[in-house]
Image (cartoon, rainbow, N blue to C red):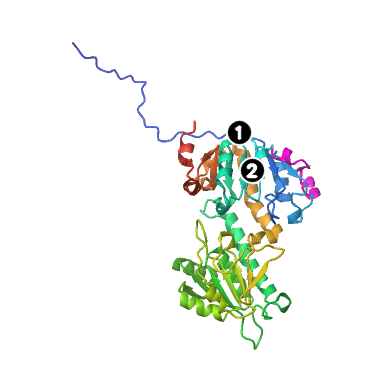
Amino acid sequence: MSSIKPQIHSAFSYETQEEVLDIPQKSKPLLIGIPKETAFQENRIGLIPEAVSVLVANGHEVLMQSNAAEGSRYSDNDYSEAGAQIVVDKEAVYKCPILVKTAPPVEADLPYLQMHQTIISPLHLTAVKKELMEQLMAKKITALAIENIKDENQNYPILRSMGEITGSAVMLIAGQYLSNFNQGKGVLLGGVSGVPPTKVVIIGADIIGEFATRNALALGASVKVFDNNVSRLQRLQNNLGQRVWTSVLEPKILAKQLKTCEVAVGALRNDFGRAPIVVTEEMVAAMRPGSIIIDVAIDRGGCFETSELTNHENPIIIKHNVLHYGVPNIPSGFARTASQAISNVLMPLLVQVGDQGSLAEIIWQQAHLREGIYLYKGALTDLYISAKFNLKFTDLNLIIASRS
């Protein structure tokens, strides 16, 4: 039996297909909803009027709930003049395919959320609940956490902006509560001629710590910075462009410095889970009466053992004759500045989404944005949430790679 030899035709091509050209989608007008936040003391807004006018000029529609921006001191008229449609009905806003929020989705939002909706909002990992996540998955939601949005340089622009605001605000708050009128020690933050400068201890050398240090130095205070990571301390020195007293977190050295300071700032956080407690109650009890602790890690439990959660209306508690400021979400107290910073990132992103046709197309084109996606069409793509609640995890890169 003779074997038949394969024939090779001259029309056959055996060149390798190394790259398949991606044909961009056609631009698509977006319908963006901005609801009024009900979260306690959330005053920020995701898009300021100037950003709305740019989106409208690009052919998109913005539907906004009445008085949604009053916490940022913007009126309905400001948005109406920018081209937004102002509605009273919350349900109408939640019917928009894209929602822009400055607080995470909560259980009260669930009845209003639509199938296959896209939500752009903070996530707040420590406050996430399993039941809520399961409901969002069931509705096939795509969700982008704004604090995890990366730019082309692998930075987190919104997270950094909020850190800059918090770090800058910390020294303003400290100066206010060191006054006699606020039960403080009665000293001026900084220094004047002939008077020794105020002593400030900052625990944490990341963005918040860096900007708190910048402002304290600008006011003339004596600043000492602690961190459990030497490279962060080195980066702080380089970014400031001057030598600052720094130390790794060694309890005896920290306790000694806390004894003589007027202001102590806790800005040490873990990437996930609770903030580490590095200042014991014994250390706090040894501090000077009338001094102030500002624990900006309070949203993750705080790094002072004596810290307690407070709010903008009643921000101070006193323990061991030391003032404790434990307000979470400090940027919300400077809502207009914070809103402008958030809007500066979200507006260009939404313009790109419109130009490319969908958020899915954007994360296909720009891999650095994928870290911000924690739900993709109902699939849970955040490994930490998956492990925390024992929910099925799906690798977003595999979903993107397998798209038709």
Q: Answer whether residue 213 is visible to the viewer in this image.
A: no
Image vertical order of residue 397 relative to residue 161, above or below: above
The amino acid type of the residue labelled 1 equals Lys
- Residue 135 spot, x, y in % from top left: 58, 39
**Quick one: SS at disc 2?**
helix
Chain-order first, disc 2 or disc 1? 1
Residue at image position (52%, 62%) is 275
Which residue in the structure is indicated by mark 2? Answer: 351
Front residue (pair 204, 38): 38
Q: Which residues are magenta?
A: 76-94
Q: Which mark is residue 262?
A: none
Q: Which mark is residue 26?
A: 1
**Quick one: SS at disc 1?**
loop
Front residue (pair 90, 169): 90
Front residue (pair 262, 402): 262
- Residue 250 spot, x, y in % from top left: 45, 74
Residue at image position (74%, 51%) is 69
The amino acid type of the residue labelled 2 equals Val
Q: Is residue 113 magenta?
A: no
Image vertical order of residue 53 relative to residue 5, above or below: below
Label 2, residues with CA under 10 Å away: few <14, some 14-19, many ≥20? many
Q: From the viewer's perspective, is 145 left or right of 82?
A: left
- Using the rendered view, name the quadrant where residue 62 is placed: top right
Q: Quadrant of the N terminus?
A: top left
